[in-house]
């Protein structure tokens, strides 16, 4: 298995989940996932990365840019009615968080997804979102506060 195939196999599901949550449309998410990996091959195929974490952050930067391009040129679609795929250990929580995440403004939602779902550090999210570290910290705090309020209203979950 070559390096490109390894990257695709390792990150395909995560990138797909990222787009499903961001776009709320499975067909668009599939297209955007493919576009992300095409850009990865085009731009990062010959680049060597100091670590796997830097490679992963670069891939999510591409995904974020693909998503911005998508929203700049598309109108919103109907909300996704089906469950969002999640890692097995997060499946129950994912069902509850899906609708709560959809209520967050896009920069907060993306920051929260990258931090909590994908495990990026604040500094890495700042690079991906082309924002300052303090802006990302603020987005994460606002996202946490909003999610806490939304989820506490739903059957006292928090």
Image (cartoon, grey):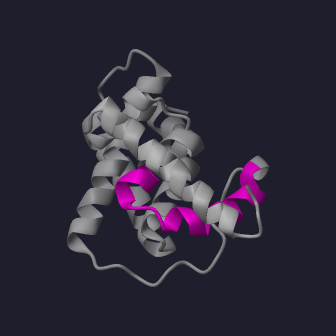
Q: What x and y, as percent, mark residue 80?
A: 54, 78
Verify whether residue 92 appears in magenta: yes
Between 10 and 21, the residue placed more toward the observer is 21
Q: Is residue 116 left or right of residue 157?
A: left
Q: Residue at x 57, y 42 (%)?
A: 116
Q: Pick the residue in front: 94 or 104.
A: 104
Q: Is residue 83 left or right of residue 4?
A: right
At x 43%, y 57%, the residue is 33
Give the quarter of the image for residue 98. bottom right
Q: Is residue 45 visible?
A: no
The residue most toward the bottom is 78
Is residue 154 within the magenta segment?
A: no
Stretch in magenta: 90-110
Q: Is residue 61 visible?
A: yes
Q: Residue sitting at 45 percent across and 18 percent down?
A: 51
Foreground of the two, 101 or 81: 101
State the predominant SS element of the stretch in magenta: helix
Number of numbered markers? 0
Residue 143 percent coordinates (x, y): 48, 51
107 to 150, vertically: above or below: above
Which corner quadrant holds the N terminus? top right
Q: Residue at x 45, y 49 (%)?
A: 142
Residue 136 placed where, x, y %? 37, 39
Q: Nearer the viewer, residue 114 or 145?
A: 145
| Above or below for 118 versus 106 | above
In this rendering, the answer to whether 118 lies above or below 97 is: above
Q: Position of residue 112 (x, y in %)?
A: 49, 47
Which quarter of the figure has residue 123? top left
- Pick the quarter of the image with the C terminus: bottom right
């Amino acid at each position: 298995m070559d390096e490109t195939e390894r990257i695709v196999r390792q990150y395909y599901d995560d990138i797909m989940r990222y787009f499903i949550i961001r776009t709320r449309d499975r067909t668009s998410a599939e297209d955007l996932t493919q576009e992300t990996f095409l850009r990865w091959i085009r731009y990062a195929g010959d680049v060597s990365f100091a670590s796997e974490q830097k490679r992963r952050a670069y891939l999510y930067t591409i995904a974020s840019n693909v998503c911005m391009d998508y929203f700049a040129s598309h109108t919103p679609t109907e909300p996704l009615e089906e469950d969002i795929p999640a890692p097995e250990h997060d499946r129950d929580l994912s069902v509850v968080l899906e609708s709560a995440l959809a209520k967050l403004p896009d920069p907060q939602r993306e920051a929260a997804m990258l931090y909590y779902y994908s495990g990026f550090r604040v500094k890495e999210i700042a690079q991906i979102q082309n924002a300052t570290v303090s802006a990302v910290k603020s987005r994460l705090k606002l996202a946490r506060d909003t999610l806490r309020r939304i989820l506490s209203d739903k059957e006292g979950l928090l």
